[in-house]
Image (cartoon, rainbow, N blue to C red):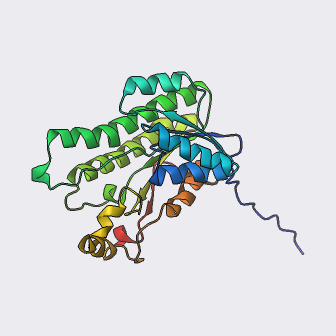
């Protein structure tokens, strides 16, 4: 009988790697940080609220992980520059900080536009740029993961600004993948559907809104933050070493229709 050498599953552990998660004080960012720490990464959590960050970092450490909390406003590009100057390079970036101001197109103000686009797109770009410069200088072949949305693949009522920012993030992601491939740095997005978090939960208390959302999620339920953790670990790990410039859409079938 011919002896067969079976391929081995690529390692999804992140031991010895350093990960940065923005907007990590709650919701999706907190879950991403917890997931990466659970598979061995040293996680740096950043957001504007030190209290929330410290609590999350403490919980990760109590669970046996490695984490530190750093207060950082990613819309302040000078702060961002100083932050990266003071730290060694990261192997993984999760570009998660974001916001939304749901309004009809005719009700959007310039302040709304600046608030959404500056955080969701401008900050994401320059955080990635600063992170990449340090990665290249340190010869790190790493992974950029941008938290997009199903609304970066479709449109939605009262979502003109949010859709604009998330569609732009998808385009940015593809170009970053091309720019950075020669350095061994990958860039991808995770595009969730409606995820139940402390921020979104009040919206789902409106039965009409909840019914409209569930009618489009073919699997029939709202997303939970745990639904995104596996995608983040996969994209951060060697298991996705040939994956770049694409989007993992975690939407329960919303965009399949």
Q: Quadrant of the C terminus?
A: bottom left
Q: Nearer the viewer, residue 244 or 90?
A: 90
Q: How many marks?
A: 0
Q: Say whether residue 133 is left or right of residue 115.
A: right
Q: Nearer the viewer, residue 201 or 131?
A: 201
- Tell me which residue sits at (59%, 30%) in the image: 89
Residue situated furthest right in the rendering:
1
Q: Say whether residue 125 is left or right of residue 41.
A: left
Q: Quadrant of the N terminus?
A: bottom right
Residue 171 x, y percent position in the rendering: 35, 46
Residue situated furthest left in the rendering:
106
- Tell me which residue sits at (38%, 76%) in the image: 218
Q: Say whether residue 102 is left or right of residue 45.
A: left
Residue 14 x, y percent position in the rendering: 67, 47
- Tell me which residue sits at (43%, 66%) in the image: 223
Image height check: is 34 above or below 257? Answer: above
- Tell me which residue sits at (31%, 50%) in the image: 167
Q: Nearer the viewer, residue 128 or 229?
A: 229
Residue 102 x, y percent position in the rendering: 23, 55
Work out whether residue 238 can be spotted: no
Work out whether residue 250 can be spotted: yes
Residue 41 x, y percent position in the rendering: 65, 44
Image height check: is 185 above or below 103? Answer: above
Image height check: is 108 above or below 253? Answer: above
Residue 104 placement: quadrant:
bottom left
């Amino acid at each position: 009988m011919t002896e067969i050498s079976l391929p081995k599953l690529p390692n999804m552990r992140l031991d010895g790697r350093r990960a940065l998660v923005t907007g990590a004080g709650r919701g999706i960012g907190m879950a991403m940080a917890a997931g990466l720490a659970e598979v061995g990464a040293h996680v740096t959590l950043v957001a504007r609220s030190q209290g929330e960050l410290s609590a999350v970092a403490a919980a990760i450490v109590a669970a046996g992980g490695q984490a530190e909390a750093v207060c950082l406003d990613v819309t302040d590009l000078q702060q961002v520059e100083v932050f990266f100057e003071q730290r060694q390079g990261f192997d993984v970036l999760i570009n998660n900080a974001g916001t939304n101001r749901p309004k009809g197109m005719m009700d959007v103000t310039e302040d709304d536009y600046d608030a959404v686009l500056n955080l969701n797109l401008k900050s994401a770009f320059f955080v990635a740029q600063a992170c990449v410069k340090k990665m290249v200088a340190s010869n790190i072949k790493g992974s950029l993961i941008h938290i997009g949305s199903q609304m970066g693949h479709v449109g939605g009522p009262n979502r003109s600004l949010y859709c604009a920012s998330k569609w732009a993030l998808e385009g940015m992601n593809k170009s970053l993948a091309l720019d950075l491939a020669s350095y061994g740095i990958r860039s991808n997005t995770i595009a969730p559907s409606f995820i139940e978090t402390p921020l979104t939960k009040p919206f789902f208390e409106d039965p009409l809104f909840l019914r409209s959302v569930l009618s489009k999620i073919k699997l029939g339920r709202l997303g939970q933050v745990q639904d995104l953790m596996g995608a983040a670990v996969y994209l951060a790990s060697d298991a996705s070493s040939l994956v770049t410039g694409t989007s993992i859409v975690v939407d329960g079938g919303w965009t399949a229709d």
